[in-house]
């Protein structure tokens, strides 16, 4: 682990609230003392993600993900501990000391890519707003009705009509061509010796990750003869198309507040709607809406409205979107705009009130699917209805919530004029969903919760209590050595607590999670801590002395069992007299302890 002074780490931890940090990524609802939401680390359909504001830790009791605020930022952003501390320190205004060279090297790869993208964003923006080279691009945007205020709000830019514009600027700032290539901003020439800018003579749309960092760009050609009207950054170590939605970082609060996400296809669609005051919008940016996109939206919203063009391509995109969104049990509605319109043109021609009226009257996803399937099958015939039911069954099979799926089955049967059994039969015969192929660039999923034996109960409760109250930890360690814990996990936790308390440092779970260095042990710590939410010295099932009393009895029982096993398997020549004497001593100590005397 990087050698950031522990007092600085603790200062950062105490300067941020884990609920605030996680709320930027997960829609949390207060449940008693804790907060509950959908787990961002697995395909969660029923809230299983618990956040404790008191303990400053989180825990998913389905996939096992758990930890403190640093661990959450590390997992959600796929960054190291140092980077997580740095990010949270920046948010909290805490000054960090200089890191060692080896610590900087650990972050060099990702930091270089982020720096390259940030430089590109500033460079493109400067050319658009402050340089005559960007005059044509600025006029294009103005002709599209985009104000300068909007240009600045979305950090729009211009890539010059040059082969090495960005390369030259980056080189003067110490960013080499290879880094630009890894960031998707440059391409190698055929001779392999030099590079050239990927984006040339284009309006640039910076794409931010779900945590606010610029990770890629969309680019709109200004030359009408250009073969590719839109050009996007390729996949990079920091940019994964299937897990990035344009505008999510900027509009997440509006989406969370309204509980609804409007999904459009293009950058200009989102920007135009924002200029008309409609801000709960994300754009798929030319890619199909994926399962990862759907899960991201589910963190912030309860419903999604797909707003696609009314042409064949738009309808096909909406169908794919419904399929993905059904898989996360979002309420889904669909708008197919009139022919010749996209959200950008519609809101400009008819205004925001007319557009919002369209949203209000959006079709339920099932109605949209039935209308779509009616263009593919003849619903006036029995065979056509059967084939249509089979098609819809593939969509309904993705719905995880049993009650919702039953209502959809009933509604489908009514609208097709068939009995529910026909739809259910089609559902049973629907192809099983294929497991998605691993995405090498996607965030690593936490391992499933490791199995560990939580017994003995007294030890489990004692460790939970020690992590909840430093005074209890001191009292226990004054009478019990860490190595006396029978459970190996509890033994290791006590072994971490002991030196900390000897140095006057807290044994809170949120702190211990940074000390354990083992994900399995971290899982046990977070599990025990969340189980111990109700730990209260005044309401404890047993007084502390009784816990320690039981602990000592169990410890003596374990020693006697081990000694008896040793005696049974002892080889000839073993000193049985010594073993018997030792057993007699343990028996006497246990009897004395059981009778409550010392």
Image (cartoon, rainbow, N blue to C red):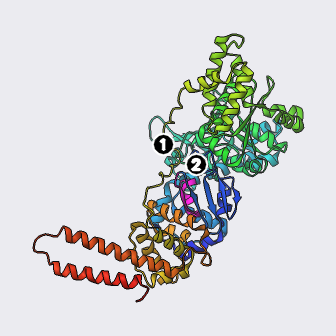
The residue nearer to you, when weighing 26 against 356, is 26
Q: In this view, does 62 lie to the left or right of 151?
A: left
State the separation of the CA atoms marked 1 and 2.
32 Å
Stretch of the chain drawn in magenta: 63-78
The residue nearer to you, when weighing 362 against 425, is 425
Q: Does the magenta stretch include residue 236?
A: no
The residue nearer to you, when weighing 316 against 559, is 559
Label 2 sits on residue: 168
Q: Which label belongs to residue 528?
A: none
Q: Is residue 383 left or right of residue 347?
A: left
Q: Position of residue 85 (x, y in %)?
A: 57, 65
Q: Which label belongs to residue 440?
A: 1
Q: Is residue 547 visible?
A: yes
Residue 230: quarter of image: top right
Q: Can residue 318 be seen in this view?
A: no
Q: Is mark 2 on a helix, strand or loop?
A: helix
Q: Where is residue 358 in the image (x, y as percent from the top left)?
A: 84, 33
Residue 345: quarter of image: top right
Q: What element carries label 1?
A: loop
Farthest residue to the bottom: give it.
Answer: 598
Residue 385 lies, with reference to residue 17, above or below; the image says above
Residue at 45%, 80% in the rendered image: 549
Which-is-in-front pick, marks 1 and 2? 1
Residue 112 lies, with reference to residue 207, above or below; the image says below
Q: Where is residue 445 in the image (x, y as percent from the top left)?
A: 51, 49
């Amino acid at each position: 682990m990087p050698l950031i002074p522990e007092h600085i780490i603790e200062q950062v931890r105490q300067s941020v609230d884990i609920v605030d940090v996680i709320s930027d990524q997960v829609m949390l609802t207060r449940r008693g003392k804790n907060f509950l939401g959908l787990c961002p680390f697995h395909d969660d359909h029923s809230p299983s993600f618990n956040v404790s504001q008191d303990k400053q830790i989180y825990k998913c009791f389905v996939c096992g993900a758990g930890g403190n605020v640093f661990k959450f930022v590390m997992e959600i952003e796929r960054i190291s501990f140092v980077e997580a501390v740095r990010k949270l320190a920046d948010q909290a205004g805490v000054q960090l000391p200089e890191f060692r060279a080896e610590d900087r090297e650990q972050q060099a790869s990702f930091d270089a890519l982020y720096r390259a993208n940030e430089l590109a964003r500033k460079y493109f923006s400067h050319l658009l707003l402050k340089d005559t080279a960007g005059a044509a691009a600025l006029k294009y945007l103005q002709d599209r009705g985009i104000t300068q205020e909007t240009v600045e709000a979305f950090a729009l830019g211009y890539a010059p009509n040059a082969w090495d514009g960005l390369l030259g600027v980056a080189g003067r700032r110490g960013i080499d061509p290879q880094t630009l290539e890894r960031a998707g901003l440059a391409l190698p020439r055929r001779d392999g010796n030099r590079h050239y800018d990927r984006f040339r003579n284009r309006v640039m749309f910076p794409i931010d990750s779900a945590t606010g960092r610029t990770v890629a760009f969309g680019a709109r050609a200004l030359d009408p003869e250009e073969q590719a009207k839109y050009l996007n950054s390729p996949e990079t170590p920091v940019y994964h198309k299937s897990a990035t939605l344009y505008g999510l970082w900027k509009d997440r609060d509006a989406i969370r507040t309204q509980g609804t996400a409007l999904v459009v296809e293009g950058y200009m669609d989102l920007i135009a709607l924002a200029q008309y005051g409609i801000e709960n919008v994300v754009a798929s940016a030319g890619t199909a809406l994926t399962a990862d996109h759907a899960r991201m939206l589910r963190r912030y919203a309860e419903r999604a409205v797909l707003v696609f063009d009314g042409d064949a391509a738009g309808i096909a995109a909406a169908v794919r979107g419904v399929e993905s969104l059904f898989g996360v049990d979002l309420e889904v509605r669909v708008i197919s705009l009139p022919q010749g319109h996209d959200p950008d043109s519609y809101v400009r021609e008819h205004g925001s009130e007319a557009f919002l009226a369209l949203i209000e009257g959006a079709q339920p996803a099932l109605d949209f699917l039935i209308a779509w399937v009616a263009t593919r099958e003849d619903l006036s015939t029995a065979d056509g209805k059967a084939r249509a039911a089979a098609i819809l069954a593939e969509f309904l099979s993705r719905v995880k919530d049993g009650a919702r799926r039953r209502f959809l089955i009933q509604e489908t049967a009514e609208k097709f004029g068939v009995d529910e059994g026909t739809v259910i039969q089609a559902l049973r015969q629907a192809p099983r969903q294929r497991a998605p192929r691993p995405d090498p660039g996607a965030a690593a999923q936490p391992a499933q919760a490791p199995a560990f034996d939580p017994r003995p109960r007294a030890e489990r409760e004692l460790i939970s209590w020690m992590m909840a109250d430093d005074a209890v930890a001191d009292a226990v360690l004054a009478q019990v050595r860490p190595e006396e814990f029978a459970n190996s996990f509890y033994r290791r936790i006590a072994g971490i607590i002991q030196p900390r308390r000897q140095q006057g440092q807290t044994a809170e779970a949120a702190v211990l999670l940074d000390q354990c260095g083992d994900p399995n042990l971290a899982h046990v710590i977070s599990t025990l801590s969340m189980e111990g939410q109700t730990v209260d010295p005044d309401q404890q099932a047993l007084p502390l002395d009784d816990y320690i009393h039981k602990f000592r009895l169990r410890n003596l029982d374990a020693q006697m069992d081990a000694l008896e096993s040793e005696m049974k398997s002892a080889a000839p020549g073993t000193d049985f007299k010594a073993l018997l004497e030792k057993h007699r001593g343990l028996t006497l100590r246990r009897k004395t302890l059981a009778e409550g005397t010392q």
